[in-house]
Image (tube, helix red, strand yellow):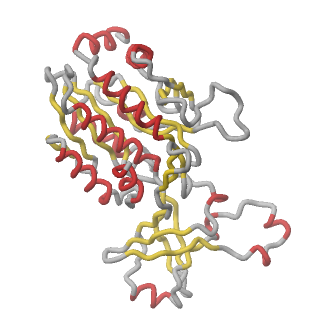
Amino acid sequence: MELLKELTEANAVPGYEGEVRRIMRREMEKSNAEITTDRMGSIFGEKRGNNPGPRVLLAGHMDEVGFMVKEIHKNGYLYFTPLGGWWEQVLLSQRVTIMTEKRSFTGVIGSKPPHLLTPQERGKVYPMKEMFIDIGAKDAEQVKKWGIRVGDPIIPICPFEMMPDHDTILAKALDNRVGCYLALETMRQLKDENHPNTVFAGATVQEEVGLRGATTAPYAVEPDIAFALDVGIAQDGPEGSGKDKPRLGGGPLITFLDATMIPNTRLRNLVVDTAEEHQIPYQVDTMTGGGTDAGKLHLFRKGVPSLVIGVPARYIHSHVSMASKKDIDMAVKLLVEVLKKLDAPALNDMIAFNS
């Protein structure tokens, strides 16, 4: 898990993915992959198999939800704006890192003290627009001397930790450093495997602010088939509504529906059949309130058969999240076995089904 630890502890909010991109490039070079990029910053390593086609894309995304400095108060506090989706209730008193060109600063998200709130204010979720970040500065002039400027990225703080069950991972940015890890580890395990295609494994940028990297990346890769590698919502908390809901430890997650895509049915069935053939436990996700990079990937040119494969995670879009190591390992195994089957006849079957 050292690689996943490094990935999650790297800082990379939308538009500022450099730290994770450097890790991705380093690991791709270890696999002797030929590297392809687009002009937005997405990066992929190419692994050629026994045949040049079909071209299969495995895409995580490098960015995590975070913030940007939008205003410096005269008393030295920082006002901020979100990069990605946040719920105000998870923010107060959390530590964050403000990254400048030369160094980083630690701050804490603050607001009006609860002792000073009116009864009406206490009954509501405190609005983000009234929160600020305290970095211990005395005034705006000191903030500027330190080199902090409007536009600097702000990243949540949470160290990587393996929980006592030796399976549950606690970290920030599992959405979606898990997808980055899945792409890299699948490529590594493919190094000594035969597969009838060319694989492009890597990650996009700016997914959390509108699937922007996934809009440009296909032009660099020209995929015939695409997999978005991402996390889904674990529903195994105390309020869980049934044993068939996604849960940690239940296996990889295959998304049958989300708000941005209905997957190619033949591709979906091939993945499910492969999981059952190799006795890989899997879970099904149907999510109508969100989407992934596959929402853009499947619309490239004339259309690309696409599917989302990932793992369930708890508490995403906050400072901390949880996932299962076993689920991650099984997701890699599933991807490797599926890639061994994605030959030209399989692609033709997917295309013919929709023609």
Q: With respect to residue 98, does 330 lie above or below?
A: above
Q: Position of residue 291 (x, y in %)?
A: 49, 37
In the image, 1 versus 210, the foreground residue is 1
Residue 212 on image: x %, y %: 37, 46
- Judge whether 68 appears above or below 212 on screen: below
Label count reads: 0
Q: Is residue 54 left or right of residue 113?
A: left
* Residue 316 rendering spot, x and y as whole percentages: 55, 48
184 vs 245: above or below: below
Q: 324 or 204, which is in the foreground?
A: 324
Q: Horizontally, is 201 left or right of 331 in the view? A: left
Q: Residue at x 79, y 67 (%)?
A: 121
Give the image quarter of residue 114. Answer: bottom right
* Left or right, 130 with reference to 24: right
Q: Is residue 184 above or below residue 142?
A: above
**Residue at (51, 87) in percent of width and height:** 137
Q: Residue furthest right?
A: 119
Q: As rendered, which of 56 and 328 lies closer to the eye?
A: 328
Q: Residue at x 24, y 10 (%)?
A: 345
Quadrant of the image containing the C terminus: top left
**Place of residue 217 in the rendered image (x, y in percent of width and height, measured from the top left):** 28, 40
Q: Residue at x 35, y 44 (%)?
A: 180
